Image: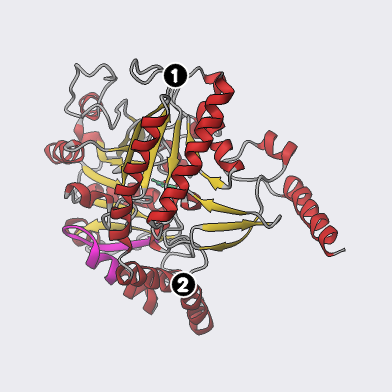
């Protein structure tokens, strides 16, 4: 009786889900036909349970954010303590609260170079919108009011608000709504064709420099990019690339915004993605990993020069979110950073990169269709290709990445695909930063079986 009650409970939830809940970044037609794939109910470590009682490995840390893994009681305790002391306090109009102050100090202390203050938001899109506004406002205060445009690059993901969504260099996120921020330009520039433009590169389509020349540097406020592109396909900036962009920005009096929403707080095996190449941006957006997803929080770090310019402004800075500097979110953030340091989480991410690379080598040695694997810390991917020696893609109709991910899912491993780009079949793997060697081996074994199942379907 208990079981049937439980099953009818799940059915009911599925029906309500289809009927009452319009989901983000989901195919509405498929969802309203099929309902939810999984209703998550519990999480522990790198694993999550669903309403049917099945357990899955969370191979992408949900949305690359649950960095400390699931069921971290210390984070819950920090939230409980703060909520029962002061759940919420405004940061507007000169008010403040202790966790926000302490977290600001902590984040600045671990940030690279002269990044010296933070503006809190409630997530990544808000952080990028804020970074754009602060960049424009900085130039306004410097008397260079024409510097308003923001340049982003191909395959970038910066969020879903009007400004961050316009900056996102993936068409699917533009198709949804016609409106754009007209001061944001998507440059034809790939992380992989080195700026500074090796124009002999067969993939060369254009570069940031072309866009600056076309628009004139006096129109450009900032360039934004991720150190490792996440949603756009796990593209890792090649050595020298970010430095070249930073130099280009400096040459042209353009601010460099690093979107560290995924990379920040250990994902790449360094505290910040920028640290892999010793880059200090002018503005840095953070979110996700700042609380490991246990609370909604983001922020924008700014250089000393920007901070010192902004603090001279003697009228109201008309920008802010109700949850900017939310005490409970900031208390969770503080505890999260304490655990990251105490448990050497960043070092673990770096060590697991080696294990992942070993696993990828095994997959490439055993499957002719597995290609182009890459990893930086615990953000990684491999691709499926019809002929990797000839660099030939699978036909779109084969849905290679989707099938492999579905086969993993059948074997209780949740992964994610990135197949926005024509001819690319990318499977992303980014488990929580607490992942151990045995977990990586289990993940690779499941992928091995899943790719074999895919190959069998091809025959
Ligand atoms: N920037 C990057 C690099 C991201 O990956 C994301 C989300 O995936 C965002 C910004 C947007 O963050 P949010 O979804 O918290 O608004």
Q: Which mark is residue 386?
A: 1
- As drawn, is 366 to the left or to the right of 349? right
Give SS at disc 2.
helix
Q: Quadrant of residue 297?
A: bottom left
Residue 375 rendering spot, x and y as whole percentages: 32, 42
In what quadrant of the picture does the N terminus appear? bottom right
In this view, which residue lies farthest toward the front? 366
Q: Is residue 196 above or below residue 72?
A: above
State the extent of the magenta-drawn residues as a range: 105-120
**Residue 85 to residue 218: above or below:** below
Q: Position of residue 362 (x, y in %)?
A: 37, 37
- The label on residue 75 is 2
Residue at 26% x, 64% y: name it.
117
Instruction: Give the mark, 1 or 2, whose residue is nearer the N terminus.
Output: 2
Q: Nearer the viewer, residue 312 or 40?
A: 40
Observer-nearest residue: 377 or 88? 377
Which residue corresponds to the image point at 18% horizontal and 22% vertical from the top-left?
Answer: 198
Residue depicted at x 36% and y 35% = 184
Closer mark to the observer between disc 1 and disc 2: 1
Residue drawn at x 36%, y 71% as measured from the top left: 339
Query: Is residue 126 highlighted in magenta?
Result: no
Marks 1 and 2, how far apart at CA: 45 Å
């Amino acid at each position: 009786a208990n079981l049937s009650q439980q099953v009818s409970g799940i059915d009911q939830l599925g029906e309500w889900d289809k009927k009452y809940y319009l989901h983000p970044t989901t195919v509405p037609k498929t969802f309203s036909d099929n309902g939810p794939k999984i209703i998550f109910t519990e999480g522990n470590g790198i694993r999550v349970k669903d309403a049917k009682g099945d357990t899955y490995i969370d191979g992408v840390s949900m949305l690359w954010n649950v960095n400390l893994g699931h069921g971290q009681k210390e984070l819950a305790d920090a939230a409980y303590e703060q909520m029962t002391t002061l759940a919420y306090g405004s940061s507007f109009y000169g008010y403040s609260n202790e966790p926000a102050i302490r977290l600001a100090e902590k984040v600045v202390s671990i940030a690279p170079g002269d990044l010296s203050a933070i503006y809190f938001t409630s997530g990544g899109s808000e952080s990028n919108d804020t970074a754009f506004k602060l960049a424009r406002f900085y130039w306004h205060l410097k008397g260079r009011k024409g510097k308003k445009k923001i340049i982003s690059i191909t395959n970038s993901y910066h969020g879903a608000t009007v400004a961050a969504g316009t900056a996102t260099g993936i068409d699917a996120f533009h198709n949804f709504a016609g409106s754009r921020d007209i001061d944001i330009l998507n440059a034809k520039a790939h992380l992989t064709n080195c700026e500074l433009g090796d124009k002999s590169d067969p993939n060369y389509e254009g570069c940031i420099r072309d866009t600056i020349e076309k628009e004139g540097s006096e129109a450009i406020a900032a360039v934004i990019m991720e150190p490792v592109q996440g949603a756009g396909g796990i593209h890792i900036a090649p050595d020298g690339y970010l430095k070249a962009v930073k130099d280009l920005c400096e040459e042209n009096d353009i601010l460099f915004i690093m979107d560290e929403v995924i990379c920040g707080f250990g994902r790449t095996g360094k505290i910040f993605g920028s640290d892999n190449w010793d880059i200090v941006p002018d503005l840095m957006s953070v979110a996700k990993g700042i609380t490991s997803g246990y609370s909604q929080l983001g922020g924008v770090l700014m250089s000393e020069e920007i901070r010192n310019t902004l603090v001279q402004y003697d009228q109201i800075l008309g920008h802010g979110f109700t949850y900017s500097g939310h005490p409970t979110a900031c208390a969770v953030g503080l505890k999260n950073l304490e655990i990251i340091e105490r448990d050497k989480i960043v070092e673990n991410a770096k060590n697991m990169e080696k294990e992942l690379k070993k696993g990828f080598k095994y997959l490439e040695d055993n499957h002719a269709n597995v290609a182009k694997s890459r990893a930086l810390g615990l953000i990684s991917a491999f691709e499926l290709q019809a002929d990797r020696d000839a660099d030939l893609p699978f036909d779109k109709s084969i849905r290679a990445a989707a099938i492999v991910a579905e086969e993993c899912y059948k074997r209780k491993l949740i992964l994610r695909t990135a197949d926005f780009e024509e001819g690319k079949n990318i499977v992303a793997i980014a488990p929580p930063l607490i992942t151990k060697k045995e977990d990586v081996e289990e993940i690779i074994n499941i992928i091995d079986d899943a790719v074999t199942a895919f190959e069998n379907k091809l025959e």
